[in-house]
Image (cartoon, helix red, strand yellow):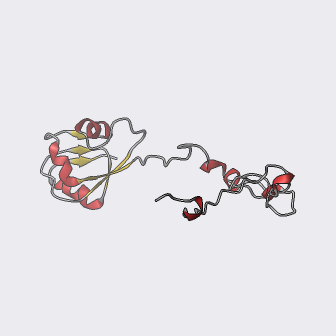
Amino acid sequence: MTSLLSQLPTLVLHTKKRVGRGIGSGKGSKSGRGTTRHQKARSTIPLSFEGGQNRLVKRFPLLRGKGRNRAIKSNKYVIYSSQLNSFDDGAIVTIESLQKIGLIEPGVKKPIVKLIQKGEITKKLTVALLVSQSVKKMIEKAGGTVSV
């Protein structure tokens, strides 16, 4: 059986309208953007554009740039009384000695250290740091001294 052209199924294809290709195309001139010839009729505008007003990002200059206003690393440390047992008898506890043991990170500028009670002190130590009242009593009870 031969097929006839009239018997073929009809295919419906819609082509994309190409706007902005001349007045003769029917979609020229303003290209379906209304009668305005202003900024919104143009191609893309930045999302941050506020009509000539200074952008929000530019109003807060500290927020711009990668890592500009990173938080300053804290230099305050809390050392517990039980951690002082890692020192030898008669040792002097200072910031440098705490850095040698590894209780304070090396290279921190002017660390502020305070000793707080948590556990017991069994060693006779000389402490040259800020201490709480209870830790001071504990050090003196063990035979050590506090010199701040």
Q: Nearer the viewer, residue 81 or 123?
A: 81
Left or right: 86 as drawn, with respect to 134: left
Q: Nearer the viewer, residue 48 or 131?
A: 48
* Residue visible at 21% across and 54% down in the picture: 81
Relative image position of residue 83 (x, y in whole percent): 20, 49
For the point 19% across and 44% down, which residue is it? 125
Tell me the residue at 85%/53% (across/down).
Answer: 24
Q: Is residue 137 above or below residue 93?
A: below
- From the top left corner, tell me how far across and down residue 43 is, in percent: 75, 51
Q: Nearer the viewer, residue 25 or 133?
A: 25
Left or right, 16 with respect to 128, comes to right
Answer with left or right where residue 133 lies relative to residue 61: left
> So how many labels did they put on this image?
0
* x and y, in percent, of residue 85 in the image: 15, 47
Q: Is residue 25 above or below residue 103?
A: below
Front residue of this view, candidates 135 and 64: 64
